[in-house]
Amino acid sequence: MAAGPWGWGPAALALLLALLLGGARRLRRRYAADGARAAPRGRAAAAAARADGARALLVTAHPDDEAMFFAPTVLGLARAGARAAVLCCSAGNYYNQGEIRKKELEQSCFLLGIPASDVRVIDHRDLPDNPAVEWDTQLLAAFVLKHIEANNINLVVTFDAGGVSGHANHISLYAALRYLHSEQKLPEGCRVLVLESVNLLRKYISILDVPISCLLPRDALFILTEEETAQARRAMRCHRSQLLWFRHIYMLFSRYMVINSLRLL
């Protein structure tokens, strides 16, 4: 007796998913083994990351951004030979947990290979942790530029105009770096990479997004191995005050725990 549409449908779908997953895993192993992949326009950024003594600065809005969104970049840069530092522009005090979250940030960064001496938190009253507040571009730019100059930074990484999650504080970081870049206030040779925001479907298909990310244009691409992904998740678990049920789901399914595609400003 011939199978009806409901008989073949699930089997065909399962086979397709298995093929996609297998292909994604092969691509992941290949690209992760090669480190950062860069399109022609991004080769200068990749070279800067690999140069001896290179200093990369990750500019984030809140404690946990470094693990939740940027772990592939942090670990990929370290693999490429760059020394990364973190400038977190708020203490994450929206629920009056700022002091706890500062300590969690240091623990997370330690697991990502960044010592506490290279982690700085800006806790300024005019830069509150609040999804409804756009931070002042000039004030924020001044803080960031001062840190860049004081630490001889030659590569800055932050959010793009979409802020990954649309958070106003994330988008404010992009506005500040775009201002510094467009006004040519950054030190000579200092480049800025921004993390690409993707649509909701791509955001939550984990490694199934690897083939898409490999095919689409970008300036730098970081893909973690399985071991590095486990390391990124351990770093995220350091943020115990933030680990609500949906964050556990995020860690399992978000492509940002495995993949970062970035563009040069």
Image (tube, helix red, strand yellow):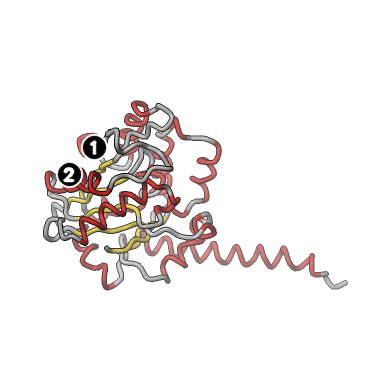
- Residue 141 image offset from top left, x and y in percent: 22, 48
Alpha-carbon distance for marks 2 and 1? 9 Å
| Rendered-image quadrant of the N terminus | bottom right
69 above or below 125?
below
- In this picture, residue 173 sits left or right of residue 207: left
Which disc, if any, is residue 216?
A: none
Q: Is residue 73 left or right of residue 23?
A: left
What residue does disc 1 label? 120
Number of other residues with Cα within 10 Å of mark 1, as a class: few under 14, some 14 to 19, many 20 or more? some
What residue is rendered at 34% in x and 61% in y? 262
Residue in the picture at 42% in, 71% down:
215
Q: Nearer the viewer, residue 182 or 103?
A: 182
CB under 8 Å between discs 2 and 1: yes
| Kind of residue at disc 2 | His
Give the left or right position of residue 70, taking residue 7 as reference: left
Would you place residue 114 above or below residue 188 in this image? above
Lower sequence index among marks 2 and 1: 1
The mark tally for this picture is: 2
- Secondary structure at badge 1 equals strand
Say which quadrant the C terminus sits in.
Answer: bottom left
Vertical comparison of 95 with 78: above or below: above
Looking at the picture, which amino acid does disc 1 mark?
Answer: Arg
Residue 139: % across, % down: 23, 44
**Farthest residue, direction right:** 1
Residue ID at (49%, 45%):
251
In this view of the protein, which residue sits in the foreground, 119 or 92?
Answer: 92
| Label annotation for residue 147 | 2
- Whole-percent x and y of residue 212? 46, 67
Residue 226: percent from the left, percent from the top? Answer: 43, 51
Quadrant of the rendered structure where residue 92 is? Answer: top left
SS for tag 2? helix
